[in-house]
Image (cartoon, grey):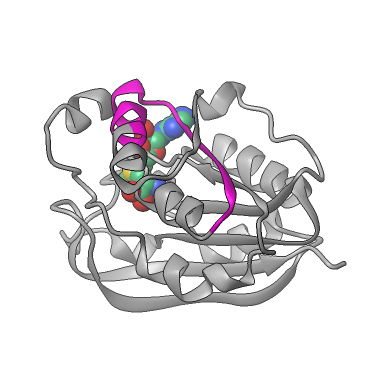
Amino acid sequence: MWNERYATPEHVYGTEPNAFLVSLAHRIPPGGRVLCLMEGEGRNAVFLAGLGHEVTAMDGSEVGLAKARTLAGQRGVSLQAMHADAADFTIEPGAWDGIVSIYGHLPPPLAERIHRAAAAGLRPGGVLILEAFAKSQLGKGTGGPKDPAMLYDLEILCRQLAGLRLEIAREVEREVHEGRHHTGLGSVIQILAVRKA
Ligand SMILES: C[S@@+](CC[C@H](N)C(=O)[O-])C[C@H]1O[C@@H](n2cnc3c(N)ncnc32)[C@H](O)[C@@H]1O
């Protein structure tokens, strides 16, 4: 499904980074190793590489990652594009200064495994930045999965990130205009979580 969605010359989520990530990118330790989960066509990874981070962009869509590589080339930055299914993907514990998940919706058991692994994957001082649609997004028609099980719940997400200091953990409504699939007022969960140094 994702390969089909991405099989068009345009970047369907745009080429500009996610606004929540932009507002918090300065919290990632300088020159850090950053893992962008479910990164699609690379808009966030390319932005972070441009800030001087060493970025790995992981996604299950080869077509999306090919566009990520092209975008990186156009912007004169380098990144590692890693084709992997989240179901088989291992996040090395204590290895990352930043882990980013932007609209990385997964089915519940897999989401739990990945979020717990992301929490464990941070180095001391490392940060997790996550934005995703909340359950209350259902029916809004402005983006996100149509299956309610794929939408996230703030309380559950916070439990999955146990062990991290949650500096931001909130559900908000905001205008999301990021490509042609995210087009208006959306209910989103926003997380900034830090592994204590
Ligand atoms: C809504 S897009 C978000 C892409 C990107 N993070 C962004 O903000 O532009 C969701 C992404 O999750 C990826 N994805 C979905 N299920 C996945 C899985 N099981 N393993 C790896 N990637 C997956 C899709 O390929 C898609 O690129």
Q: Nearer the viewer, residue 58 or 70?
A: 70
Q: Nearer the viewer, residue 148 or 79?
A: 79
Q: Quadrant of ligand 1?
A: top left
- Where residue 149 appears, as percent x and y from the top left, is 41, 45
Give me the residue at 22% from left, 52% from top.
Answer: 14
Is 77 situated left or right of 87 in this image? left
Where residue 135 appears, x then y in whole percent?
39, 60
What residue is at 42 percent from the left and 26 percent from the top?
60
As rendered, which of 110 and 184 lies closer to the eye? 184
For the C terminus, the image quarter is: bottom right
Image quadrant of residue 71?
top left
Tell me, yes or no, whether the highlighted magenta stretch contains residue 68: yes
User: Which residue range is magenta in the image?
Assistant: 52-69
- Along the horizontal axis of the image, is 30 left or right of 77? right
Q: Residue furthest right?
A: 197
Residue 159's image quarter?
A: bottom right
**Residue 182 lies in magenta, yes or no?**
no
Q: Would residue 57 be found to the left or right of residue 165 on screen?
A: left
- The image shows residue 189 at horizontal and vertical percentages of 46, 67
Quadrant housing the N terminus: top left
User: Is 150 on the left or on the right of 182, as rendered?
Assistant: right
What residue is at 13 percent from the left and 41 percent from the top?
10
Q: Position of residue 62 (x, y in %)?
A: 35, 22
- How many numbered marks are there? 0
Of residues 82 and 175, the one nearer the viewer is 82
Indicate whether 71 appears above or below 190.
Answer: above
